[in-house]
Image (cartoon, rainbow, N blue to C red):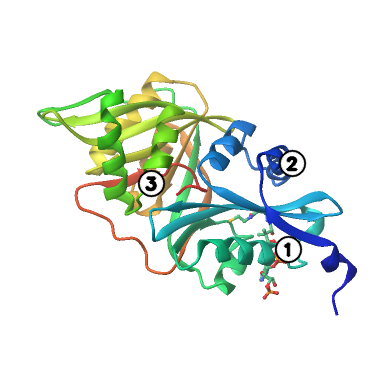
Amino acid sequence: METSAEADLRLRDMTAEDLAASHALSIEAQWPHRPEDWDLMFGVGFGVVAERAGKIVGTTMAWPYGADAATLGMVIVSQACRGQGVGRKLMDAVMARLGERTILLNATPDGTPLYRKLGYEPVGSIHQHQGAAFSVPIPRLRKGERVRPLGASDAAAVIDLDRRATGLERPELMTAVLKSGQGVILDRGGEAVGFALFRRFGRGYAVGPVVSPDRDGAKALISHWLGSNAGMFLRVDTPGDSGLSAWLEEMGLKEVDRVTTMVRGNAPARGDGAAPYAIVSQAFG
Ligand SMILES: CC(C)(COP(=O)(O)OP(=O)(O)OC[C@H]1O[C@@H](n2cnc3c(N)ncnc32)[C@H](O)[C@@H]1OP(=O)(O)O)[C@@H](O)C(=O)NCCC(=O)NCCS
């Protein structure tokens, strides 16, 4: 028999009018997103909300990339309504809309048991580093290499590098993210082989995504933003296998949290010569 709480629950597509109430939920969960961060996420994806007595008590969002993949995130249920199956229903609804796509997500410890039950497997981790850097050594660059400002004509190269590094086809997202900040390119003999973006996010600024052929290149790219923003609050979300955590700690960006990357379906195949050293955000991957 349905309890009155269950009968009262309504799931529906998220609209732009729901963003303020959704933002209030992420504040309650002590997540740092600003209204502008929700706007960007909604602009390139879609969401499902759970309502009880006309009040939004839960959210989930997803971002389809190409025909076969998607990321899923912003899975939040208000504290008073947790443990009553709302999260499960939101996940079922958003996954039904994604069909047979491979789905990637970054799971908090709260979310991991639910995702495991839904068939997601852990494949990696994301280390969240943040803080202020005060003294940044001059990066070691190789012969023929330089870090230069990213211009409008670099957009296609950035989208291609992101695709090779992540295996995800997401020109729409990358175009929106490029518009939301500034960037630098790792240039080798006139060819763009890596990039790092710098954008407003949450409490301060985020360095990411960062794509590079190797760790030294990633350090050179990130050093550019740390050095030119000494003393400012910056955040870098780096994959556990990037090997950058110890260096970021040395720079003054402490690891404050760690989430588990999980996948349902076949993980996207990555290309050669480019790897992710910082993600766009935990939601976008
Ligand atoms: C994660 C979250 C959305 C779950 O929402 P919820 O409404 O409480 O989840 P549900 O009640 O639908 O529980 C889902 C399933 O996970 C199980 N589960 C939940 N927490 C669990 C735990 N700590 N240990 C074991 N199982 C757990 C439930 O038993 C349920 O299983 P069932 O469907 O087989 O009965 C909620 O805790 C939340 O908003 N947390 C804060 C934000 C967050 O971290 N979100 C995750 C981002 S990745």
Read off the residue under disc 1: 86
The CB of the residue at mark 1 lies under 8 Å from ligand 1: yes
Q: Which quarter of the figure has residue 80?
A: bottom right
Q: Nearer the viewer, residue 2 or 257?
A: 2
- Inspect the image, locate mark 1, and give the three-letter code of the amino acid beneath it: Val
The residue wearing badge 3 is: 170
Q: Eyeballing the image, is 54 above or below 175?
A: below
Circle nearer the N terminus (2, 1)? 2
Q: Nearer the viewer, residue 223 or 73?
A: 73
Mark seen at residue 169 = none
Mark with earlier residue (3, 2): 2
Quadrant showing the N terminus: bottom right
- Residue 208, how many percent across, how many down? 41, 37
For marks 2 and 1, give the CA distance. Answer: 17 Å
Disc 2 residue type (three-letter): Ala
Ligand 1, by image quadrant, is bottom right
